[in-house]
Image (cartoon, rainbow, N blue to C red):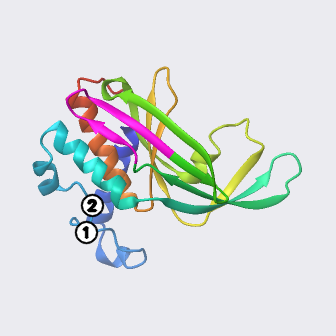
Amino acid sequence: MRVLAMSAALLILVAVTPASAQDQRPAAPSSSQTAPNAANSAAVKTLEDTLNFIAAKIKEQGELKFIAYWRKREDSSAGLSELSDDLRGTTFDAAGCRVNYVWRAKFNGKAFDDIVRPFDLKSVRHVQLMNEVKSLNYDGTATKNVTKVSQPITEVWLAFDNSPVRQFWFHNPEDAEAVALAFTRAVELCGGLLQD
């Protein structure tokens, strides 16, 4: 929640900064690009609407392909790997407050992971945004340290008390933020208790 609050505060700061200072930075997204805006929030009232919004964003993203550039921790030799993540098999059950999480991943063009991890929305404890480089380096036991990725990727992380995280990847950071807000709403509608 702190990450989302900081993102909102940053957007407000950019919006109230004088135009002369803004000329030196890229333009902030307009309110029509930042979803869910007031009109979107009003339209997304029910749990079913919220989950349909998330499903549509996942479908819109499609298979996410990128290159990860890495360096081995033991000898600093470098290399790269072509990766892809596809979550389009994920389904949502509003009546049961459940998500059937399906992650299909490829490594250098070959399928290497097909994870199916259903979860209850009320069991989600944290919803946060994370960049892909930080996420790929999250496991300190890995033999490679990812130094960069070929294109920006923002992940929505859903964390649980006693279960692996579920990740949702987006090239567009505004889509990732909108999905994080929608997951937060879905958890609350299902009676879950998010922790700060």
Label placed on residue 34? 2
Amino acid type of the residue that numbered disc 1 sits on in the rendered structure: Ser
Rendered view: 41 above or below 189 = below
Query: Seen in the image, is 9 located left or right of residue 104?
Result: left
The answer to whether the residue labelled 2 contacts the one labelled 1, judged by CB atoms less than 8 Å apart, is yes
- Segment colored magenta: 89-103
Q: Position of residue 135 (x, y in %)?
A: 57, 45
Amino acid type of the residue that numbered disc 2 sits on in the rendered structure: Thr
Name the residue rendered at 36%, 23% in the picture: 123
**Is residue 10 in view?**
no
Quadrant of residue 69 within the rendered picture: bottom right
Label placed on residue 30? 1
Residue 97 lies in the magenta-colored region:
yes
Q: Secondary structure at mark 1?
A: loop
Q: Position of residue 119 (x, y in %)?
A: 39, 28
Name the residue rendered at 49%, 20% in the picture: 162
Rendered view: 132 above or below 14 = above
Residue 195 lies in the magenta-colored region:
no
Name the residue rendered at 60%, 53% in the picture: 106
Query: Seen in the image, is 42 located left or right of residue 88?
Result: left
Separation of residues labelled 2 and 1 (CA atoms): 7 Å
Q: Position of residue 179 (x, y in %)?
A: 32, 48
> Looking at the image, which is closer to me, 32 or 164?
164
Magenta stretch: dominant secondary structure: strand
